Image: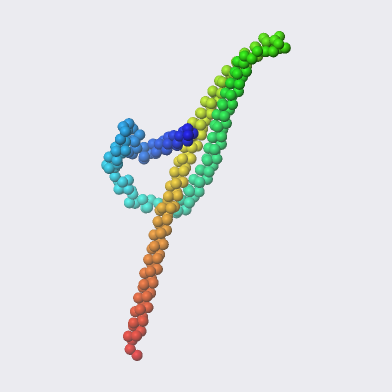
């Protein structure tokens, strides 16, 4: 499917641009190798280069103190940011849909103009002989056909201009909201991973800690009860 392949090509181009424009990723050795290597064994080259690059959390001096830089109300700010990203994403999704419809109408208009011009050309090139009743007006009909053929050329030019306009709207107008939507989608995915991953693990850790604390308290109470029971029987009357 040509449309599917074209959509995937555009999406891949947007993804590569987003990664290459990132202030940190743009300086990454593996990314530079991936974008500049022209050989066939790029996977092996990437593996060799990756062995020389350590984990970012091992290389970064601030990784061990990352939690110290978080504000106290980080969860509240996270919830507000997540809702803001969701609202912006929904609004731009609607804008992108309208832009796609505008570009689609321009392309359909170009196709209609082209068909219109072809029909005019077909009428102007018609060689069907006139009946005897209309023989006196043959010169008029000939002039009319020449005029229609001339109009077909004009409609062909209009169709070409409309097609260029539609293609430009697809490449410039529609792709910009798509690029921004891809960026917003990455933030949405990051929020979901944070909720399902970090927050979920944090909640599980708290739950596990509370269970452990209750077990310790229960064990302490049992020990106290047992000690009281023993001392109660050992006290002489």
Residue shown at 47% from the left, 32% from the top: 2
- Name the foreground residue: 37 vs 93: 37
**Residue 118, horizontal then vertical, whole percent:** 58, 21
In the displayed structure image, the side of residue 141 where residue 63 appears, left or right: left
Residue shown at 41% from the left, 53% from the top: 197
Residue 208 lies in quadrant: bottom left
Is any atom of residue 21 visible in this view?
no
- As drawn, the residue found furthest toward the right would be 133
Residue shown at 57% from the left, 29% from the top: 108
Residue 102 lies in quadrant: top right
The colour scheme is: rainbow
- Name the foreground residue: 187 vs 101: 101
Q: How many marks can you see?
A: 0
**Residue 182, horizontal then vertical, whole percent:** 46, 40
In the displayed structure image, the side of residue 169 where residue 217 appears, left or right: left
Which quadrant is home to the C terminus? bottom left
Is any atom of residue 231 visible in this view?
yes
In the displayed structure image, the side of residue 195 where residue 47 appears, left or right: left
**Residue 37, horizontal then vertical, whole percent:** 32, 33
- As drawn, the residue found furthest toward the bottom would be 237
In the displayed structure image, the side of residue 29 where residue 211 appears, left or right: right
- Name the foreground residue: 150 vs 85: 150
**Residue 192, horizontal then vertical, whole percent:** 45, 49
Residue 154's place in the image compared with 46, above or below, is above
Residue 102's place in the image compared with 191, above or below, is above
Residue 48's place in the image compared with 140, above or below, is below
Residue 68's place in the image compared with 176, above or below, is below
């Amino acid at each position: 499917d040509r449309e599917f392949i074209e959509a995937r090509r555009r999406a891949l181009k947007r993804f590569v641009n987003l990664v290459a424009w990132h202030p940190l990723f743009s300086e990454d050795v593996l990314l530079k190798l991936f974008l500049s290597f022209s050989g066939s064994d790029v996977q092996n080259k990437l593996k060799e280069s990756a062995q020389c690059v350590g984990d970012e959390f091992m290389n970064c001096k601030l990784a061990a103190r990352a939690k110290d830089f978080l504000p106290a109300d980080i969860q509240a700010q996270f919830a507000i940011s997540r809702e803001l990203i969701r609202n912006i994403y929904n609004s731009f999704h609607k804008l992108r849909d309208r832009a796609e419809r505008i570009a689609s109408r321009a392309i359909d208009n170009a196709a209609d103009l082209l068909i219109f011009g072809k029909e005019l050309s077909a009428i102007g090139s018609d060689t069907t002989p006139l009946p005897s009743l209309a023989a006196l007006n043959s010169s008029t009909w000939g002039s009319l056909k020449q005029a229609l053929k001339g109009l077909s050329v004009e409609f062909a030019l209009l169709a070409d201009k409309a097609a260029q306009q539609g293609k430009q709207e697809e490449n410039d107008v529609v792709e910009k909201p798509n690029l921004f939507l891809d960026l917003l989608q990455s933030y949405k995915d990051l929020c979901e991973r944070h909720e399902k991953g970090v927050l979920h693990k944090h909640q599980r850790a708290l739950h596990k800690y509370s269970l452990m604390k209750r077990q310790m308290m229960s064990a302490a109470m049992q020990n106290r009860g047992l000690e009281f029971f023993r001392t109660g029987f050992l006290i002489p009357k």
